[in-house]
Amino acid sequence: MALTDSVRTLPGIGPKKAELFAKLGILTVGDLLRFYPRDYEDRTQLLPIMSLEADTPACFIASVVSTPRTNRIPKPGQKALEVTKVTVADHTGRLNLTFFNASYTAERLIRGESYCFYGTLVGDYLGYAMTNPLFEPLSEPGKVTRCICPIYPLTAGLTNKVVLQAVRAALDTEPAPQLLPQGVTEAYGLCEADFACRNIHEPSSHEALEAARKRLIFEEFFLFSAALSIVRQKRTLQEVEPFSDLDLKPFYEVLPFQLTGAQSRVIGEILGDFSSRKPMSRLVQGDVGSGKTMVAAAAAYCAAKNGKQSALMAPTEILAKQHYDRLRPLFESLGISCALLTGSQKEREKKENRQALAEGVCDIVIGTHALLSETTVFRNLGLVIADEQHRFGVAQRAKLMSKGISPHLLIMSATPIPRTLALILYGDLDVSVIDELPPGRKRVDSFLVDESYRARLNGFIRKQAQEGHQTFIVCPAIEEGETESLKAAEIWAQTLKQTVFPNLRVALLHGKMKGAEKDAVMQAFAAGEYDILVATTVIEVGVDVPNATLMVVENADRFGLSQLHQLRGRIGRGDAKSYCILVSDNQNAETKQRLKALCATTDGFKIAQEDLKLRGPGDFFGARQHGLPTFRVASIANDMTVLKQAQQAAAIAISNNDLPDELLHCVHQLLESGEFVMN
Ligand code: ADP
Ligand code: MG
């Protein structure tokens, strides 16, 4: 058996169970070994019978003092109920055990022998008793008692026991993969791979579990760093023809405003890249509203002047359309042709645009995922721009880049990744920061309120409308299994329209609507046809509505701080004073503090740093949207020191050509999984 074999090769796993394992993302034996417990139950403490507490599961050693007796209680039309009773005792007391439908197991208990039990004491009017405890002879090593028991994330139909049995079978037949060179294991005082794999699943002690975790964290980061270096090496081997025409004056002349100092500086950095032989890999970070679009436009203009096509990929149709509407007049006044390509366009229109791209008639294309389609072909793609990059899978970006020969890459992100993190995670990207907002922006005042403010809040919304201004109301996404107290956008919009604001015009926007439908609502709102827009976070990125002065976020505790900050960036774009109101009834002190911190600052980077500290990178970027790798054991926020060590070790191992084959295999898997930062 090999790590790449299907889990079906393990004893006890047939097609049905294999399907359940697949639901958990476990296809191979290797996947199973890397499927780590989400928690552990500590059963290492042994208590005397007298000290057992009701309703608290515990382990105890006792000898059997009666012969197990089974009664069968007939049930009409059903199998009889088997009740087995047996009494056990230690030097502190006696306890009656009852087993239901487990006579076969219970009758293995032999009078006079000692066993270790694990169960929960329950009390009733007859005194205390215990039902269906787990037990093992004292002479055998503890597998369900006297151990630290793993608890796996499960799916319906799959029990913890089944997972554990499968893991044991895999551990018995397959040595753990060797991902680290032996020298690294020794240099960093790590335990052996096999030990780590066994003890992360079934720790023999707390110390063993710690040692196992330490190695696995190191391994994950080592793998990640090695993959990053390999990608980087590939990219630095590429060569491009430097752009010769770097004169942007004509572009600046058609702009309706003067660029900020920060925008000019970043454009300068981009031009520096364009004039070198290495393809650009640059991340531009700038707070919401800092004017990233114009920086991207300047880059695209420069590429066009040098005979190269550019593709600007936006995460939503609304955003792509907005970019297009804003930029096309600029480009066309400069004699540069610009097209839009989105999924909801008519087939004929798409076809025409694609043809223009293939023939090189079109210089700049702005679009959505439609850009990725096989039928989108470029004549001479020289620059790929990904807007709001955290919204894209990395694989999608790579796909777009593969449509050109070593194109330059520019990534625009309003999610301010803290500098320390960016340096490590995007070690292969140059980072530019737009740390200045265009002049005339007004500070948005933010407040945290609870339900007791509802009436006042409604009054405030009414007042905005009376003054001719508009309000966004954002609700958490409508998702399966969410509790009903959440103000799902759809229901909330209904309530507002019918009972709370019958005299105001209320619109609804959510992610499940079709692109064209969303567009229509958004455009109508931007045109002032509605007073209130109830929405999910689909409005988080992009669209400009300068007349909107109020942002209300319902169940604000459900959002990440950075996400709230993005939402807040939707307002304060016009001349009037703007407000952001976070509504939350959550009483958790930490949550309240988090939300208050957001109200107190407008610095996106500070907020991001805070968010990262509190929630970890996964939540920070919104579940699985961040384009960052996901780690199983390691946490980017907490294990930064290990990350640095692993990075050093990987660099040395690569330069010594000392990467184990199994690691290289994993690197390939990682790169192909699309979960990885590939630039
Ligand atoms: P973001 O960085 O969030 O993508 P945008 O590029 O959408 O920001 O810019 C936000 C708004 O600011 C737009 O309306 C844009 O036209 C305007 N803008 C950008 N740069 C400047 C500038 N230098 N001076 C004045 N307004 C600007
Ligand atoms: Mg933008």
Image (cartoon, rainbow, N blue to C red):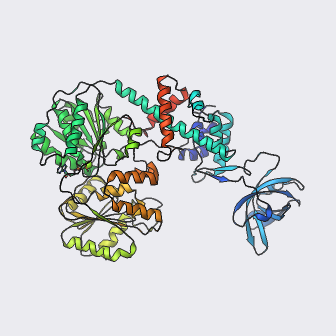
Q: Is residue 306 left or right of residue 88?
A: left
In the displayed structure, 530 sits above or below 390; it is below
Indicate the position of residue 539 as horizontal and vertical percent values.
Answer: 30, 56
Which of 227 and 475 lies nearest the eye of the viewer?
227
Residue 449 sits in quarter: bottom left
Question: Is the N terminus in the top left, top right, bottom left or bottom right quadrant?
Answer: top right
In the depicted view, which residue is nearer to us: 51 or 546? 51
Task: Judge by depth and name the residue closer to the eye, 90 or 10.
Answer: 90
Q: Residue furthest right?
A: 112
Does residue 348 show up? no
Quadrant of image for the C terminus: top left
Q: Position of residue 237 (x, y in %)?
A: 35, 24
Q: Is residue 99 above or below residue 678?
A: below
Which residue shows up at 79% across the image and 60% down it?
48
Q: What is the x, y in percent for residue 563?
A: 36, 55
Q: From this viewpoint, is residue 142 visible?
A: yes
* Residue 441 location, quadrant: bottom left
Q: Is residue 427 left or right of residue 359?
A: right
Please tell me how many numbered marks the rendered image carries. Answer: 0
Q: Residue at x 24, y 40 (%)?
A: 266
User: Residue 314, image x and y in percent?
Assistant: 28, 45
| Residue that appears at 72% across and 67% down | 54
